[in-house]
Image (spheres, helix red, strand yellow):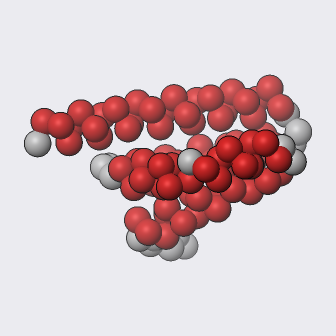
Amino acid sequence: MKLALTAKDVVHLHNAFHQKIILASHNKRLCKQLNHVKALIHYCRLFHFSGGKRAETIQREHAAILAELKERRSHDAVKAMADHLSHDLLHLKQVLSKTAQD
């Protein structure tokens, strides 16, 4: 049975997922840099979850990334991450375009 999540829940889980990936990298420089832009990232994610079934898509993409990481298939994990980021960028452009038109 699927639980109904609020947008706030999804944003929290999204942030936690990304933080775990960053920490797992053991890259202190990356961690430091991303902590500096955390507020901006959070702001963008609020837009990111608006419209359609975006939250479900993100959860599916995160599951695919995690599966590749667990199996240590780095090439496939990189591809899954790049696809996820491309979808994020496309969706954000659509949301911002719609917002500008309103």
Question: Looking at the picture, does residue 8 appear above or below residue 83?
Answer: below
Residue sitting nearer the eye, 13 or 76: 13
Can the viewer see residue 60 in this picture? no
* Residue for point 79% across, 53% down: 23
Q: What is the total number of numbered labels drawn onto the structure image?
A: 0
Quarter of the image with the N terminus in it:
bottom right
* Residue for point 42% across, 48% down: 44
**Residue sitting farthest toward the left:** 102
Can the viewer see residue 71 in this picture? yes
* Residue for point 56% across, 53% down: 38
Residue sitting nearer the eye, 35 or 6: 35
Quarter of the image with the C terminus in it:
top left
Task: Give the x, y percent position of residue 76.
Answer: 76, 29
Q: Is residue 100 left or right of residue 74?
A: left
Q: Is residue 1 left or right of residue 91?
A: right
* Residue for point 49% across, 63% down: 10
Residue sitting nearer the eye, 72 or 22: 22
Task: Give the x, y percent position of residue 55.
Answer: 45, 54
Q: Is residue 1 left or right of residue 34?
A: left
Question: Looking at the picture, does residue 46 appear above or below residue 81?
Answer: below
Task: Give the x, y percent position of residue 63.
Answer: 66, 50
Task: Give the x, y percent position of residue 79.
Answer: 69, 27
Quadrant in the rendering for residue 8: bottom left
